[in-house]
Image: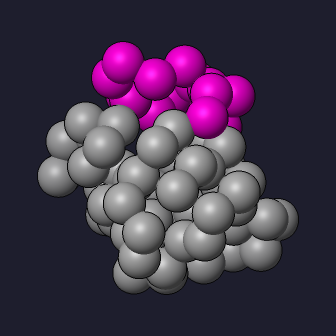
Amino acid sequence: MKIIVEYAAVLDAKDVASGSTVEIPDGATAADLLNRLKVRPEHQKHVVPFVNGAKKRLDAKLRDKDSVFLSVPVGGG
């Protein structure tokens, strides 16, 4: 299935530019998408996926043509 993926500049994704369409297997989750993007496992727990504009968990199953924005909360003062 094909997913449109966008992410904040602070996310260290490999080989896929933000705004790209990515091919992933049917039944894949947001966590599987992070693996496809080669996001390091220690960073994955900090990523918040928004699927079609709705905040989801990393174990959320994705569907063909979903739009996924991967956010990384940043704190500071």
Q: Check residue 27 for magenta coloring.
A: no
Decide if residue 73 is in sight here: no
On the picture, is 8 further left or further right than 11? right
On the picture, is 30 further left or further right than 64? left
Decide if residue 61 is in sight here: yes
To which quarter of the image does residue 8 belong?
Answer: top right
Q: Position of residue 25 (x, y in %)?
A: 37, 60
On the picture, is 66 further left or further right than 58? right
To which quarter of the image does residue 13 belong?
Answer: top left
Q: Position of residue 33 (x, y in %)?
A: 39, 53
Above or below, 50 against 71 in this view is below
- Give me the residue at 71% from left, 57% from top: 65
The answer to which of 3 and 37 lies nearer the viewer is 3
Q: Main secondary structure of the magenta part?
A: loop
Tally the numbered discs: 0
> What is the basis of the colouring in this image?
one colour
**In the rendered view of the protein, which quadrant contains the C terminus?**
top right
Q: Check residue 10 for magenta coloring.
A: yes
Above or below, 76 against 45 in this view is above
Q: Position of residue 55 (x, y in %)?
A: 69, 74
* Farthest right residue in view: 53
Range covered by the magenta-colored residues: 6-21
Q: Position of residue 12 (x, y in %)?
A: 37, 28
Above or below, 45 against 12 in this view is below
Above or below, 25 against 41 in this view is below
The answer to which of 16 and 58 lies nearer the viewer is 16
